[in-house]
């Protein structure tokens, strides 16, 4: 369903959701958040906002990943 859409899409997973989408363990996502955000964006052709104490935003086109370091671990 997610891969069949035609409209631009923003995905906002936390590490656990990202792990499920990638088919890996949560600890793998947490150890490689930048890689996970890029992989999700490429795999699902979507902009991905990977939530966490440092939020990462990766575009589907593979451009620069944006980093927002102002969050907390509660996010």
Image (cartoon, grey):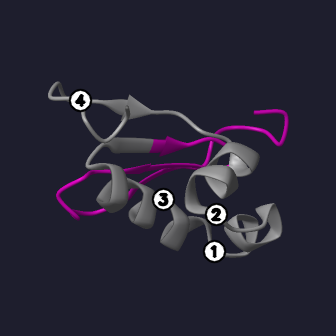
Q: What residue lies at 42% left-to-right and 66% top-to-bottom?
A: 39
For label 1, the residue is: 32
Chain-order first, disc 2 or disc 3: 2
**Which residue is located at x 27 percent, y 63 percent?**
64
What numbered label is drawn on residue 37?
3
Asked whether residue 69 is drawn in magenta, I would say yes
Marks 1/4: CA–CA distance: 27 Å
Distance Cα–Cα, label 3 vs label 4:
19 Å
Q: Earlier in the sequence, mark 2 or mark 1?
A: 2
Q: Residue 10 appears at what percent x and percent y?
A: 36, 31
The residue carrying pointer 4 sits among few (fewer than 14), some (14 to 19) or many (20 or more) residues within 10 Å by Cα, namely few
Is 61 rendered above or below residue 46? below
| Of labels 1 and 4, the one closer to you | 4
Disc nearest the viewer among 2 and 1:
2
Do the CB atoms of the residues marked 3 and 4 lie less than 8 Å apart? Answer: no
Kindly identify which numbered label has been placed on residue 5: 4
The residues bearing labels 3 and 1 have C-alpha atoms spaced at a distance of 9 Å
Tag 2 secondary structure? loop
Which SS class for mark 1?
A: loop
Span colored in magenta? 49-75
Q: Secondary structure at mark 3?
A: helix
- Left or right of 21, for residue 14: right
Q: Quadrant of the C terminus?
A: top right
User: Counting residues from the N terminus, which is met first, the one under dot 1 or under dot 4?
Assistant: 4
Nearest the viewer among 26 and 75 is 26
Residue 53 seen by the camera: no
User: Where residue 34 appears, x then y in whole percent?
Assistant: 52, 68
Rate crowding at label 1 as few (under 14), some (14 to 19) or many (20 or more) other CA atoms within 10 Å: few
What residue is pinned by disc 2?
A: 23
């Amino acid at each position: 369903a997610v891969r069949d859409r035609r409209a631009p899409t923003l995905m906002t997973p936390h590490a656990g959701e990202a792990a499920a989408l990638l088919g890996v363990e949560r600890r793998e996502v947490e150890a490689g958040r930048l890689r996970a955000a890029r992989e999700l964006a490429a795999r699902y052709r979507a902009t991905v906002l990977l939530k966490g104490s440092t939020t990462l935003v990766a575009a589907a086109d593979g451009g620069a990943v944006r980093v927002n370091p102002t969050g907390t671990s509660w996010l």
